[in-house]
Image: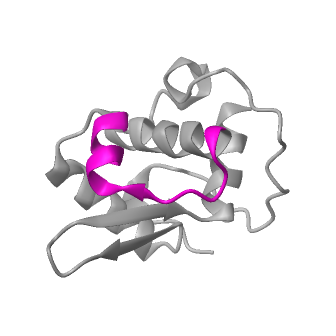
Amino acid sequence: MVVPQDSHLGHTDDSHPAVPAAASQQTLAENPGNDNLDPALAALLQAFWDTHQEAPGKRLSLARLSKRADLPMSTLRRTLTQLEDGGLVTVSIDEDGTGSALATPELLGLIEDLLG
């Protein structure tokens, strides 16, 4: 697994256990070890985590993801591109410009590690 260098994830361990069914209620923004985490990335990761807790395996439309993460579409797309380049999300764009995204199990493992 390759982590985008500018994503500030700071974690390159290839081994991630399955995400447990019981989720931590702690948010990425509240985690004291995440002081260097880009706020846009933290918001996006939190949106993926919350969605995973509600409906594992669910794809999110980019519009819905933008609203959940409270990010402008341009910031969302830029951050998703970085994560997709690292193999951490799957993004699908339709001919009409709409699209959806799905976090990989590796990304969900990284998020769980960040939530500690």
Residue in the image at 82% along x and 33% along y: 22
Image coordinates for residue 88, horizontal then vertical, percent = 53, 66
Q: How many marks?
A: 0
Residue in the image at 67% along x and 32% along y: 115
Image coordinates for residue 112, horizontal then vertical, percent = 70, 42
Image coordinates for residue 55, horizontal then vertical, percent = 63, 46
As for residue 55 lying within the magenta part, the answer is yes
Q: Foreground: 29 or 69?
A: 69
Residue in the image at 35% along x and 46% along y: 65
Q: Is residue 43 left or right of residue 9?
A: left
Magenta residues?
A: 54-68
Residue in the image at 60% along x and 27% along y: 33
Image coordinates for residue 23, horizontal then vertical, percent = 75, 32
Extreme residue in the bottom direction? 95
Q: Foreground: 81 or 20?
A: 20
As for residue 18 lying within the magenta part, the answer is no
Q: Is residue 33 left or right of residue 98?
A: right
Q: Is residue 19 left or right of residue 55?
A: right
